[in-house]
Image (spheres, rainbow, N blue to C red):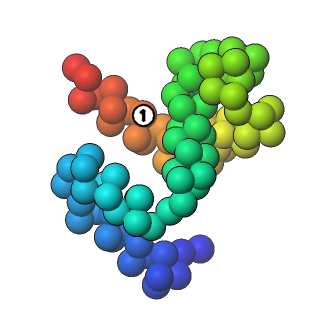
Amino acid sequence: MPNDAINSLYKAVLTLDTVEEVAAFFDDLCTIREIQDMSQRFEVALLLHEGKNYGEVSAATGASSATISRVNRCLHYGKNGYKTVIKKLESEKK
């Protein structure tokens, strides 16, 4: 359950307007490895959403089966965070 500090972080992200602003904020906030890990999980989510199997996802991303499984669980049983973002990105493409 989010506390005040976590909610403050979420609100901070909502104030950003451009990819450049988000990148600068995340570069200051996170290590390179943390950003790489988050981007890999998001790429896994996109590929699973497209219907790729674990082998295809692993080959494309280098993600472990544990990471792919965790992301898959979130896609099916999570709070719909991945699905919400994917749907919004798909709407932007149209």
Farthest residue to the right: give it: 66
Question: Would residue 63 be found to the left or right of residue 7 on screen?
Answer: right
Residue 24 appears in which quarter of the rendering? bottom left
Farthest residue to the left: give it: 17
Crowding around mark 1 (Cα neighbors within 10 Å: few <14, some 14 to 19, many 20+) is some
Task: Pick the quarter of the image with the N terminus.
Answer: bottom right
Q: Is residue 80 visible?
A: no
Label 1 amino acid?
A: Ile
Reply above or below: 81 against 87: below
Q: Position of residue 27 (x, y in %)?
A: 41, 59
Q: Is residue 72 visible?
A: yes
Residue 7 appears in which quarter of the rendering? bottom left
Task: Pick the quarter of the image with the C terminus.
Answer: top left
Does dot 1 land on a helix, a strand or a loop? helix
- Residue visible at 33% across and 26% down? 90
Question: Would residue 68 be found to the left or right of residue 14 on screen?
Answer: right
The residue identified by callout 1 is 86
Q: Position of residue 55 (x, y in %)?
A: 75, 17
Farthest residue to the bottom: give it: 4
- Residue visible at 53% across and 53% down? 32
The count of marks equals 1
Q: Position of residue 11 (x, y in %)?
A: 33, 70
Reply above or below: 5 against 57: below
**Front-most of 26 and 67?**
26
**Front-most of 74 and 6?**
6
Reply above or below: 9 against 71: below
Q: Position of residue 26 (x, y in %)?
A: 41, 59
